[in-house]
């Protein structure tokens, strides 16, 4: 398989007031569909069903009425494959980054997601769902997570969501980028980072911190 050409919409958080109009325009443009089919993949199982219900209502408010929940532990391989093949957009929720990455690997959804991207599908990642799409997510350590830092490899930088709330002093992020030899985009709630192929478009007050050291 060739390297994927990603179409990614990366968020810190979604609210109708701050991101609704942007998401409506972006998802229609990137998917080529007026009412794209969206599959929701959460960071945990249906213990957080209310989070899915809130997300479904968000998409319905911006005109997207076909939003399905995928619980990969409850589906066989064929069912998971069909869910990805029948969708135009995959939504990756927020939550804890490392358990989310482990869930994708354990259920085979990491490979299905990469195949989905190679077919031209759109991925929208929110918070943890945005972070795990990179080659690494070392920045999860800033949120006191410990574990495996290898992501899906769909972009070569790192994300810090909720930046103004969690890291109001930018020196902490700058120092982390230098120490860990990574480039970092910081997103505040309401900001959007769009990755389309090699093009990166920022919407909002996004900051970029470049490591002066060779990247790992």
Image (cartoon, rainbow, N blue to C red):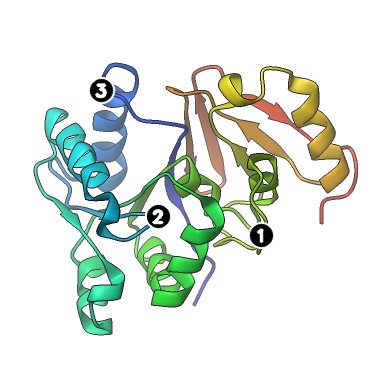
Callout 1: SS: loop
Q: Residue 163 at x, y = what percent?
A: 59, 26
User: Which residue is situated farthest in the front direction here?
Assistant: 47
Q: What label does residue 16 carry, if any? A: 3
Whichever of callouts 2 and 1 sits on the residue coming sooner in the sequence is 2
Relative vertical location of residue 187 with respect to residue 132 in this rendering, above or below: above
User: Could you tell which of marks 1 and 3 lies nearer the N-terminus?
Assistant: 3
Q: Residue 216 carries which label?
A: none
Q: Is mark 3 on a helix, strand or loop?
A: helix
- Gap in angstroms between the C-alphas marked 2 and 1: 16 Å
56 versus 145 height, above or below: above
Q: Is mark 2 in CB contact (under 8 Å) with mark 3?
A: no
Mark before the other along the chain sequence, 2 or 3: 3
Residues 25 and 16: in front is 16
- The relative height of residue 127 versus residue 2 in the rendered view (above or below) is above
The residue pinned by badge 2 equals 43
Percent of width and height locating residue 89: 28, 52
Which residue is drawn at the image coordinates 41% and 76% (left, top)? 108
Residues packed near mark 3 inside 10 Å, few (<14), some (14 to 19) or many (20 plus):
some
- For marks 1 and 3, give the CA distance: 31 Å
Q: Residue at x 40, y 61 (%)?
A: 117
Give the number of callouts: 3
Given residues 53 and 9, the one toward you in this image is 53
Q: Residue furthest left?
A: 65
Which residue in the protein does label 1 denote?
A: 149
């Amino acid at each position: 398989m060739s390297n994927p050409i990603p179409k990614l919409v990366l968020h810190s958080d979604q609210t109708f007031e701050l991101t609704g109009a942007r998401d409506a325009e972006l998802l229609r443009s990137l998917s080529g569909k007026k009412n794209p089919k969206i599959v929701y993949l959460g960071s945990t199982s249906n213990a957080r069903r209310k989070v899915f219900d809130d997300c479904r209502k968000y998409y319905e408010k911006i005109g997207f009425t076909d939003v399905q929940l995928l619980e990969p532990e409850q589906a066989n391989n064929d069912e998971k494959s069909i869910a990805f093949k029948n969708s135009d957009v995959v939504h990756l929720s927020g939550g804890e980054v490392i358990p989310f990455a482990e869930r994708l690997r354990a259920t085979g959804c990491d490979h299905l997601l990469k195949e989905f991207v190679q077919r031209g599908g759109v991925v929208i990642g929110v918070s943890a769902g945005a972070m795990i799409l990179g080659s690494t997510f070392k920045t999860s350590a800033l949120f006191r997570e410990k574990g495996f830092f290898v992501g899906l490899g769909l972009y070569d930088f790192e994300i810090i969501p909720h930046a103004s709330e969690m890291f109001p002093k930018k020196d902490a992020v700058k120092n982390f980028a230098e120490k860990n030899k990574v480039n970092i985009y910081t997103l505040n709630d309401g900001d959007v980072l769009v990755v389309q192929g090699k093009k990166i478009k920022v919407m909002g007050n996004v900051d970029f911190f470049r490591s002066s050291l060779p990247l790992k």
